């Protein structure tokens, strides 16, 4: 596959297009993968070398899956060569797009965004993959905030086509269009949403998950039957409890907290069972147990 170059973007940096992804957990590595898969040079950054090693392994696994099903034609090894794994923020300097996908903790996000914005040129698009923090609030940590926006991906990133593109009051049409063109280039189908807590996806999804947990708590049906109701009755690929386990129960709780604080509406309040699971370390798939038990990959 030819390397991507700026076309409609004036080519001011010229040469190959470079996308940097800060944070190499499940979402960050998926984001890096789709850009590499589509011909971009990728700088995959994390402060933790173990996370980088795991990211490399999991990207290769995912690419192998896609290759074996002919979903991609370029060899996984060649695609992987376009990804530079780095633990240094300096490496993002010559990027054309930087996407922050670090832990969903306010101080970590704000600190990372300040560092990105101090490192790159003033016209480089900076996106955040936050699922619940206000884009307007985060924009205070980015110099030239007209180029800053939410770029909210869905797990598993290589499979899910949706991206929520979230503008702050300061994001300009010019940068929204640039970002959305890039997302379309990597096979995504964006929706454009305003900066309201939970955007569209989590504002609607979290009350569903919450209600399913309450139904479970009240013993109306067991977890399998609650999930089966949605898989067979509504054609959802996963029922709400399976999905909560897949997203991470701690993540669901964090998102519900943000929604509850911001809207002050009890329909967003995290149920006791969810809190108990999270407090006892049952975080869903990643910890090996949530509403179901799982084998944890080493
Ligand atoms: N890389 C490459 N291929 C992958 C993959 C990955 N990371 N993950 C899954 N696949 C492929 C599988 O190989 C399989 O391919 P085939 O159908 O061609 O064989 C296909 O995707 C389906 O996978 P599985 O057979 O393993 O299992 P499945 O049919 O249950 O699908 C799933 C898995 C795609 C995750 C599906 O269950 C699903 O769509 N679930 C809902 C996911 C969802 O809602 N995600 C959004 C969560 S919310 C979020 O992310 C945002 C937030 O803010 C909380």
Image (cartoon, grey):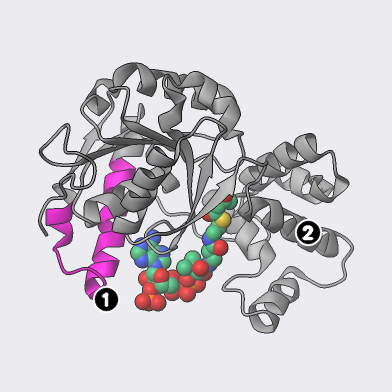
Residue 116, placed above or below residue 38: above
Residue 143 shows in the view:
yes
> In the picture provided, is 5 more to the left or to the right than 284?
left
Question: Mark 1 vs mark 2: which is more N-terminal?
Answer: 1
**Region in magenta:** 53-79
> In the picture provided, is 8 more to the left or to the right than 28?
left
Residue receiving disc 1: 69
Residue receiving disc 2: 213
Q: Does the magenta stretch include residue 289?
A: no
Few, some or many C-alpha atoms within 10 Å of disc 2 (few <14, some 14-19, many ≥20)?
Answer: many
Tag 2, which secondary structure? helix
For disc 2, does the CB lie below 8 Å from ligand 1?
no
Q: Which residue is drawn at 16% across and 50% down?
A: 4
Classify residue 119 by image quadrant. Answer: top left
Image quadrant in which the N terminus is located: bottom left
Image coordinates of residue 142 in percent, x first then y, are 45, 22
Q: Residue at x 28, y 27 (%)?
A: 87
For disc 1, does the CB lie below 8 Å from ligand 1?
yes
> In the picture provided, is 167 more to the left or to the right than 291?
left
Image coordinates of residue 185 in percent, x first then y, are 29, 57
Furthest residue toward top: 118
> In the picture provided, is 282 more to the left or to the right than 225?
left
């Amino acid at each position: 596959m030819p390397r991507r170059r700026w076309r409609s973007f004036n080519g001011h940096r010229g040469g190959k297009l470079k996308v940097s992804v800060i944070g190499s957990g499940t979402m960050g590595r998926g984001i890096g993968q789709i850009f590499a898969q589509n011909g971009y040079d990728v700088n995959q950054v994390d402060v933790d070398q173990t996370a980088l090693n795991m990211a490399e392994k999991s990207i290769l696994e995912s690419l192998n899956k896609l290759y074996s099903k002919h979903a991609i034609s370029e060899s996984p090894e060649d695609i992987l060569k376009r990804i530079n794994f780095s633990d240094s923020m300096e490496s993002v300097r010559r990027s054309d797009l930087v996407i922050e996908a670090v832990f969903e903790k306010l101080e970590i996000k704000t600190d990372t965004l300040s560092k990105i914005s101090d490192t790159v040129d003033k016209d480089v698009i900076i996106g955040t993959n936050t699922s619940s923090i206000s884009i307007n609030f985060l924009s205070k940590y980015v110099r030239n905030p007209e180029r800053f926006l939410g770029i909210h991906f869905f797990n598993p990133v290589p499979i899910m086509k949706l991206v929520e593109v979230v503008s702050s009051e300061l994001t300009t049409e010019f940068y929204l269009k640039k970002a959305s063109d890039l997302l379309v280039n990597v096979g995504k189908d964006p929706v454009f949403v305003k900066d309201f807590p939970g955007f569209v996806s989590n504002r609607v999804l979290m009350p569903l998950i919450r209600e399913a947990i309450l139904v479970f708590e009240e013993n109306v049906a067991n977890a399998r039957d609650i999930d089966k109701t949605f898989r067979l009755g509504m054609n959802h690929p996963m029922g709400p409890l399976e999905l909560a386990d897949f997203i991470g129960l701690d993540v669901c709780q964090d998102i519900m907290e943000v929604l509850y604080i911001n809207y002050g509406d009890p329909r967003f309040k995290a149920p006791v069972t969810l809190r108990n699971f999270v407090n006892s370390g049952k975080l869903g798939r990643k910890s090996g147990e949530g509403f179901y038990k799982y084998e944890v990959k080493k």
